């Protein structure tokens, strides 16, 4: 669905009921904007991105430490699980990535999900070797797979600061081109946008996107890096710079610049600033 179908939010009727806000359904956010269900097979992620919300939650609730998060541990029970047919699209993965270290496990899980008839949203900061493995293995399931590659900047120096163990912009672009050339559904997530030059990403990836390009703000950034990178003043300074760039006025200008582009979609962090409808149903991907 294009953005032109996303109407401005209308204020609800006035009420004197003290808990009216509690009774309203909450807008879908995070992974819930894209898929009804998530599947993950490990604790930790070797990408070790500084802004990672999954890492933040794991550290906060003592499932990992800032140092141990990068030492990913695969849950064999989840790998060997018999996956049935879900009601809606399944996002895989959402709290870790697909890498050379876990690709064989990921292929096994994807095989089970696809054979059960599920549509899968494959989200990754991709390595070309892994994407070639997925595309080669599941060419008979193309209609059930939509790739969504995370690309928050076209500047490798920026990517390296935020995502120290992830692939370069050039490699991610190669992955997108490879999947596109083989006839897979392709999309891009610029969430979080890691600098003020997201237009460079959009220009580079647009010819190879069949579905959508999502733009999203850095959420809870100061709180997240305080947990993920305690005492790291360089990351703190980087976060302060990013937040200073991504003001509400900047978001409004960004929206006005791209609102008529049919493949651009806006995450909840932008919808609530510009007044777009915020769906309460999970997995609509609009």
Image (cartoon, helix red, strand yellow):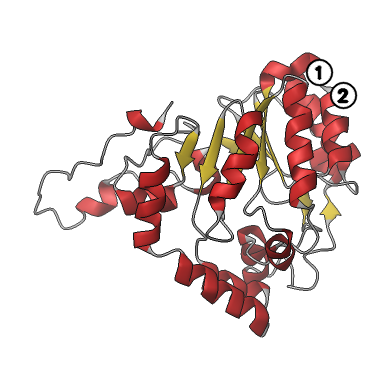
Label 2 element class = helix
Which residue in the structure is indicated by mark 2? 136
Residue 164 lies left or right of residue 88; in this view the side is: right
Label 1 element class = helix
Q: What is the crowding at mark 1: few (fewer than 14 residues within 10 Å), some, or many (at least 20)?
A: few
In percent of width and height, residue 60 lies at 62, 70
- In this view of the protein, which residue sits in the foreground, 33 or 237? 237
- Callouts 2 and 1 close, C-beta under 8 Å: yes
Residue 129 lies left or right of residue 38; in this view the side is: right
Q: Residue at x 25, y 42 (%)?
A: 9
Give the Cα distance between marks 2 and 1.
6 Å
In percent of width and height, residue 276 lies at 32, 42
For residue 262, above or below residue 267: above
In percent of width and height, residue 148 lies at 65, 37
In percent of width and height, residue 171 lies at 80, 45
Of the 4 image quadrants, the one containing the C terminus is: top left
- In this view of the protein, which residue sits in the foreground, 113 or 200? 200
Q: Residue at x 44, y 34 (%)?
A: 261
Which residue in the structure is indicated by mark 1? 139
Q: Residue at x 87, y 24 (%)?
A: 136
């Amino acid at each position: 669905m294009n953005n032109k179908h996303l109407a401005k939010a209308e204020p609800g009727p006035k009420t004197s009921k003290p808990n009216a806000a509690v009774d309203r359904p909450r807008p879908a956010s995070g992974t819930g904007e894209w898929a009804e269900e998530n599947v993950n097979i490990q604790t930790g992620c070797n990408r070790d991105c500084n802004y990672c919300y999954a890492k933040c939650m794991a550290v906060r609730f003592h499932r990992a430490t800032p140092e141990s998060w990068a030492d990913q541990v695969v849950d064999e029970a989840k790998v060997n699980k018999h996956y049935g047919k879900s009601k809606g699209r399944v996002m895989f993965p959402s709290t870790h990535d697909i890498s050379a270290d876990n690709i064989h496990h990921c292929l096994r899980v994807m095989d089970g999900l696809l054979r059960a008839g599920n549509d899968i949203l494959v989200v990754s900061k991709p390595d070309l070797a892994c994407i070639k493995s997925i595309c080669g293995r599941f060419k008979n399931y193309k209609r059930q797979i939509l790739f969504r590659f995370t690309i928050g900047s076209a500047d490798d120096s920026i990517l390296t600061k935020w995502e120290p163990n992830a692939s370069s912009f050039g490699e991610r672009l190669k992955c997108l081109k490879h999947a596109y050339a083989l006839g897979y559904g392709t999309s891009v997530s610029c969430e979080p946008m890691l600098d003020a030059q997201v237009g460079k990403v959009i220009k580079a990836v647009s010819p190879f996107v069949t579905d959508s390009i999502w733009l999203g703000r850095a959420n809870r950034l100061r709180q997240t890096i305080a947990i993920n990178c305690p005492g790291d003043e360089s990351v703190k300074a980087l976060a302060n710079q990013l937040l200073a760039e991504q003001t509400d006025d900047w978001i409004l200008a960004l929206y006005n610049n791209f609102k008529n582009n049919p493949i651009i979609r806006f995450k909840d962090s932008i919808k609530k600033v510009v007044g777009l409808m915020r769906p309460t149903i999970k997995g609509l991907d609009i």
